[in-house]
Image (cartoon, rainbow, N blue to C red):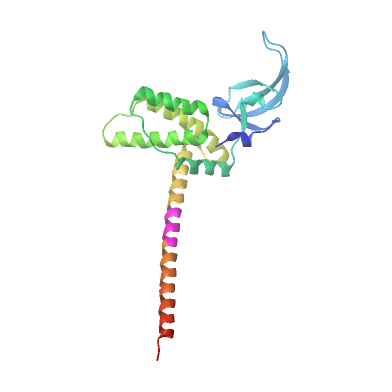
Amino acid sequence: MDFGKFSRKEYVVGDYVIYGANGICRITDIRREKFSGLDERLYYVMNSVYDAGARFYLPYSSGNGEGRLRPLLSVDEIRSIIDETEDIEEDWIDNDDERVTAFEAILRGGNIAEILWLVKILHLHKIEMRERGRKFRACDERVLAQAERGVTEEFAFVLGLRKEEVIPYIVDYITAKREEGRDDERRGAGAYRTDTLRNDIERAGQQGADRPL
């Protein structure tokens, strides 16, 4: 999902934003500060939502925090992102180093759909390893934890869920959508059979009307 179209030119005190890897923050002030070795300038002052002791100062820079802030997703945007993950191919990379490099690049990229895909594919692989009596690799566990944090905090906050409820919500949503798709296919097949039967009946009636007495 392209977050550029959701970006804002300026944020105000009280806004909740995503500040990169720091997660959800609330802007508590916009004020001038002079830090050691730096010129005085205007800063966003932000407190982390999930880490009560964390405070961040980000240069104001035309109101967009130097492009390092973005607004929270809406409920509809979250559902669109979940839908997007269904279209991403599930290719597993066997080599540990290559896999970690690829997965960490996804985390750095910040594309929520791809990060959610990471959560999905790593959970599936974890289940597969458990069923085969093998251990889930520590490198994959670390990436999974980072990916889950990148998804669950924002999803939980926006959807009004506890963080541990986010993954079950996603699973239920995908399951319901897939079932809805199967229902549409069944309805489509039923409509096709009905139309075919109707056409056959009409043709038979026409043939009967054309038959000489």
Taking the magenta stretch, the answer to whether it contains residue 180 is: yes
Q: Residue furthest left?
A: 133
- In this rendering, would 109 be left or right of 66? left
Q: Where is the C terminus found, in terms of image quarters?
A: bottom left
Q: Nearer the viewer, residue 118 or 2?
A: 2
**How many numbered callouts?**
0
Residue at coordinates 65% horizontally, 20% vertically from top-left? 57
Q: Residue furthest front?
A: 212
Q: Nearer the viewer, residue 195 or 31?
A: 195
Q: Is residue 156 above or below residue 135?
A: below
Taking the magenta stretch, the answer to whether it contains residue 16 is: no
Can residue 51 be seen in this snapshot?
no
- Residue 171 is drawn in which quadrant? top left
Residue at coordinates 65% horizontally, 23% vertically from top-left? 66
Q: Position of residue 71 (x, y in %)?
A: 62, 34
**Segment tinted magenta in the rendering:** 179-188
- Residue 186 is drawn in which quadrant? bottom left
Q: Where is the N terminus found, in terms of image quarters?
A: top right
Can residue 144 be seen in this snapshot?
yes
Q: Position of residue 38 (x, y in %)?
A: 68, 10
Q: Main secondary structure of the magenta part?
A: helix
Q: Residue furthest top?
A: 37
- In this rendering, would 182 be left or right of 21? left
Q: Is residue 16 above or below residue 192?
A: above
Q: Position of residue 34 (x, y in %)?
A: 71, 13
Residue at coordinates 31% horizontally, 36% vertically from top-left? 128
